[in-house]
Image (tube, rainbow, N blue to C red):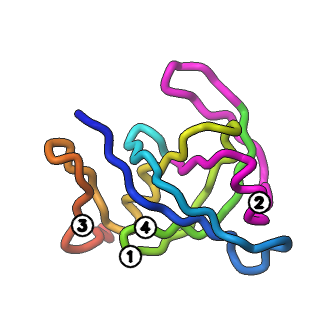
């Protein structure tokens, strides 16, 4: 399977203090990642505030503790909100599966594209 990228914009939620700017970039769609990750310096430049820390398991099996915040996540004309990890500076931005599923988008591994579901399941 090849890599799939999508343009994503991260915006701090209403009520966040600070600069209130957005961060937009091409994110690697990572169906193995639950949450979305952005380099910490890019998130801090938006004014997004950390809400806490959690331990995450990386692809190589290592455990790392990272700060996280909650932000608006925009891609493919859709808007959702969710946990965004303050990743290491210089790391590749990742769009996690929670954001994808919350707006009804799946990865087509054959064509390396994103597909919309006809409806979001509520069952």
Q: Residue 82: where, in percent of width, then height?
A: 57, 62
Q: Quick check: 45 above or below 120?
A: above
Q: CA distance from mark 2 to mark 3?
A: 31 Å
- In magenta stretch: residue 112: no
Lower position in the chain sequence, tag 4 or tag 3: 4
Percent x, y of residue 67: 75, 45
How many residues crowd around disc 2 within 10 Å: few (fewer than 14), some, or many (20 or more)? some
In the image, 101 versus 85, the foreground residue is 85
Please report whichever mark, 2 or 4, sits nearer to the chain's N-terminal start: 2
Contact check, label 2 and label 4, Cβ < 8 Å: no
Q: Residues within 10 Å of mark 1 (few under 14, many from 20)?
A: few
Which residue, given by chain and number where applicable, does mark 2 sit on? 45
- CB atoms of marks 4 and 1 within 8 Å: yes
Mark number, residue 77: 1
Hey, which residue is sitting farthest right in the picture? Answer: 18
Q: Secondary structure at mark 4?
A: strand
26 left or right of 101? right
Residue under circle 3? 116
Residue positioned 32% across, 46% down in the render: 4
Q: Is residue 49 magenta?
A: yes
Residue at image point 75% right, 49% down: 41
Residues shaded magenta:
35-64
In three-dimensional space, the C-alpha distance between marks 4 and 1, rounded to whole angstroms, equals 5 Å
- The kind of secondary structure element at disc 1 is loop
């Amino acid at each position: 399977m090849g890599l799939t990228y999508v343009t994503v914009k991260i915006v701090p939620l209403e009520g966040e203090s600070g600069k209130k700017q957005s961060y937009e970039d091409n994110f690697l769609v990572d169906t193995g990642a639950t949450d979305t990750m952005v380099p910490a310096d890019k998130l801090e430049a938006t004014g997004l505030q950390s809400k806490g820390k959690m331990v995450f398991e990386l692809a190589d099996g290592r455990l790392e503790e990272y700060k996280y915040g909650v932000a608006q996540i925009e891609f493919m004309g859709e808007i959702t909100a969710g946990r965004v990890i303050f990743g290491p500076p210089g790391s590749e931005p990742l769009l996690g599966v929670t954001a994808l599923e919350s707006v009804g988008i799946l990865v087509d591994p054959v064509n390396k594209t994103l597909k919309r579901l006809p409806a979001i399941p509520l069952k």
